[in-house]
Amino acid sequence: MEYLQELLVLLGSLGGLAAVIAGVINLLKIPGWLPDGWAPTLSAGLNLLALAVLFAVGVWFPDLDVLGLDEKLAEFAAVAVPFFTYALQLLMTKLGHTALRGIPGIGKSYSL
């Protein structure tokens, strides 16, 4: 039981992991792949999965520097989330242009 408490404290201190989970959830919301109201459920599921992974790492790889890995996740989230959000914005703009093509007044294209 004490080991589980230690894992919960460790999970709560992993800010990089929290940032990646939040980023993934927000990216899934943008194109509508995550239905309304499902974000808390997915967040709880991903955090439970992270707890299971921490448990497995503690059993099989007790010398692994989890906080060091979390620092790398935080760096990844700081770069990846804005990049993927921008890429998704470009995709959504193209889809919007395709949807509006041919509508009088707003769907005009001057390209050949």
Image (cartoon, helix red, strand yellow):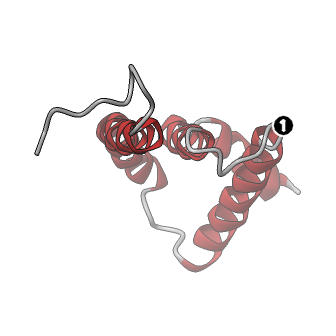
Identity, as a three-letter code, of the amino acid under mark 1 = Gly
In the image, what residue occupies the spot 56% across and 38% down?
A: 30
Above or below for 92 versus 50: above
Residue farthest toward the left in the current orientation of the protein: 112
What residue is pinned by disc 1?
37
Location of the N terminus (image quadrant): bottom right
Q: Is 6 positioned to the left or the right of 62 in the image?
A: right
Is 6 on the left or on the right of 82, as rendered? right
Residue at the extreme front of the image, as rendered: 104
Q: In front: 64, or 16?
A: 16
Q: Nearer the viewer, residue 70 or 20?
A: 20
Residue drawn at (64%, 75%), measured in percent from left and top? 59
Residue ID at (46%, 67%): 63
Query: In the visual, does 109 lie left or right of 19?
Result: left
Task: Give x and y (percent) for residue 16.
Answer: 47, 40
Which part of the image, by quadrant, shows the C terminus? Answer: top left
Residue 22 image point, x, y percent? 58, 37
Taking the view exactly as shown, the residue that stands out farthest to the bottom is: 60
Q: Residues within 10 Å of mark 1 (few under 14, many from 20)?
A: few
Q: Residue at x 40, y 38 (%)?
A: 102
Dividing the picture into quadrants, the one containing residue 52 is bottom right
Instruction: Classify residue 40 by image quadrant.
Output: top right
Q: Position of residue 38 (x, y in %)?
A: 81, 44
Residue reaching furthest top? 105
